[in-house]
Amino acid sequence: MKKARDIFGSLFGRIFIPVLLGLVFISVTVSFTVLYMSRQVFTDTYGASQEKVFSRIEKELDDFHDDLQDMMTAIDSSWAFRLFLDSKEEMDNMDRFRNIYQMEADLEAAKSSDMESMNILVLGLNDRHYLSRTETISMTDDAIWESAPVRLAVDEPDVMHYQVSHGGYTATAKGRDVIIISKALYYQETGEIYAVVLITLTQDDMRRFYDYFITDYSSFYMTDKEGMVLCSDDRAAVGGKNEASWMSYISDREGDRFITEDGTNLTVLRRELTYQDCMIYGIIDNDKALGGLYNMPLLIFICVLISAIVLVLVLFLTSRAMLPLARLAGKMTKVQEGDFMEYMPVEGTSEVRNLAVTYNYMLDDIKSYIDELMNTQQEKRTAEIKALQMQINPHYIYNTLASIKWMVYAGDREKTIKMIDAFISLLRNTISNADEFITVKQEVENLNNYTLINQMRYGDTVRVAFHVEDECMDCLMPKMILQPFVENAFFHAFPSGRKGNINIYMEKTGENLAVSIADDGVGMKQDRADMELNRDTKKEHFSGIGMHNVRDRLSLLYGDEAEVLISSVENKGTTVSIRLPAMSSEHSDDNNAGTDGTEEGRNGL
């Protein structure tokens, strides 16, 4: 009992049940396929029976063509028609009446019973015409002679031509889609044409030939040799080229009956009317035809219902089995994003429970390792920043003490005191203050003290001016980040007592603090300025560590968010541009976290 419960509670058991249900679904599908195949057999049988009906249409159209041909022959052999259409002599009323009466008698004798509704116009070259029905001709004789059916009959006088036209020659046919059958009359001895017979058939006249074939699921098309639709139950297609998809399907195939495979179950019947130079097509929608015999919607509904029930069961059981795995995958995605608190509840199948336990143990190990790694990296970063700070401190103190020593030797007690006071203030704000960040206001104060010390030693030949926006004063920046650049300007931009100016600009640009230190000293070539900034600091002595120290400290503190650029032109000056994130002083506690300064150190000298 326990073993069976373990099997059905395992992942294998949860997958086995949907597979079993899937097999049931396949059985239903096979049954439906058998039903579909039986429908195919019926399609062939029904298509064969309709093919016989279509053959009857073909025969009736051929017979109708023969009747037209007989009528054309009767008109051509009638002495009354020849006299009326060929003679150019004027007739008196009595002769004209007798002639027309004989023409009507000859025509009635030649017409079959199904030609009573047709409009027959015989047009002679002698500007006379005969119309079989009492109505008005809507075109001039010249216009009729220039029409396409007449020109085609004149070009090929031995053939009876079928053409579709929007509008006939009489008032009743005007504006309607009609079929015009044209045939030239000529003398056999000379081949000279003396008249043209024009028979106008409406779509209703033609429909009687195929009307018994038309149902809700079948259609009829008759086209000429160019593919133009002459007549059809689809009135919108009449007069245009037949470009239906089934037309392209059967265009390169031989035979008279086709079942298309273009997504629609159609049977296409085709016959060629050789004497008319036309084609007729019968289109049967098998799905609609079979729908009347089989209750296909009910059958499909039953199959769909069974399939839906099976599908719901499969989805339900599979989702229940796979839900813990999906939850585990989601939690692992969050772990990948850095959230290491996504523990997995131990639930589901036995395999999933074992996987969840292992995952939770692994998560604890990863958290422990990452915490240790982050602490190590933080300590390493702090040590690197302090090392850089300690690297610049001896260099800076050495230069300042040398300046004080020089003032003592000079015996200027008052300036010496001012210099020592400025130096003490610098030490308090830089070396004794363990905080890595100070405000811009403090940095400006430190630079003022540093400038005072240098000017007392070297004189005021180099003037320093500060241009700082008020909104920058409370922003935080790393301490002693500007002093190396001001020092370089003092001692390298103005050699041999050269006078000049150093301007320091600070402003906020969006989320950044922009600082520029510009001098009008001797300058240098741009490639040398780039080389000085990017030179390896480990190979330099104290005299070359200032700018590199700033670059390395900013890289450690801000990464790619900080930038140092130097632009210089010989004999015009140098500009150092520094960009770093603008942080307000209210975040100073967060930014200085991780330093080892004590309260005594912060309140030192």
Image (cartoon, rainbow, N blue to C red):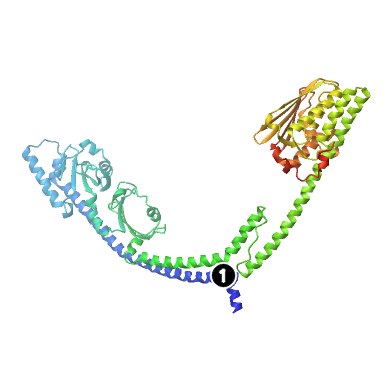
For this orientation, the residue located farthest to the bottom is 1
Q: Could you tell me if residue 173 is visible in this image?
A: yes
For residue 468, above or below residue 161: above
Q: Give how far across and how far down residue 84 sits, in percent.
A: 13, 41
- Judge by depth and name the residue closer to the eye, 483 or 188: 483
Question: Percent from the top left, x then y, of residue 211?
Answer: 25, 57
Q: Is residue 193 left or right of residue 528?
A: left
The image shows residue 385, relative to residue 417, as above or below, that is below
Camera-nearest residue between 538 and 70? 538
Residue where numbered disc 1 is placed: 14
Which image quarter holds the C terminus?
top right
> Badge 1: how crowded within 10 Å, few (<14), some, or many (20+)?
many
Observer-nearest residue: 558 or 565? 558
In this view, the residue in front, 136 or 270, is 136
- Where is residue 158? Give x, y as percent: 26, 47
Above or below for 511 versus 22: above
Q: Residue furthest left?
A: 94
* Quarter of the rendering containing residue 591: top right
Mark 1: amino acid: Arg
Q: Is residue 348 above or below residue 278?
A: below
Name which quarter of the figure residue 371 lies in: bottom right
Q: For residue 603, which quarter of the picture?
A: top right
**Rendered location of residue 455, percent (x, y):** 84, 24
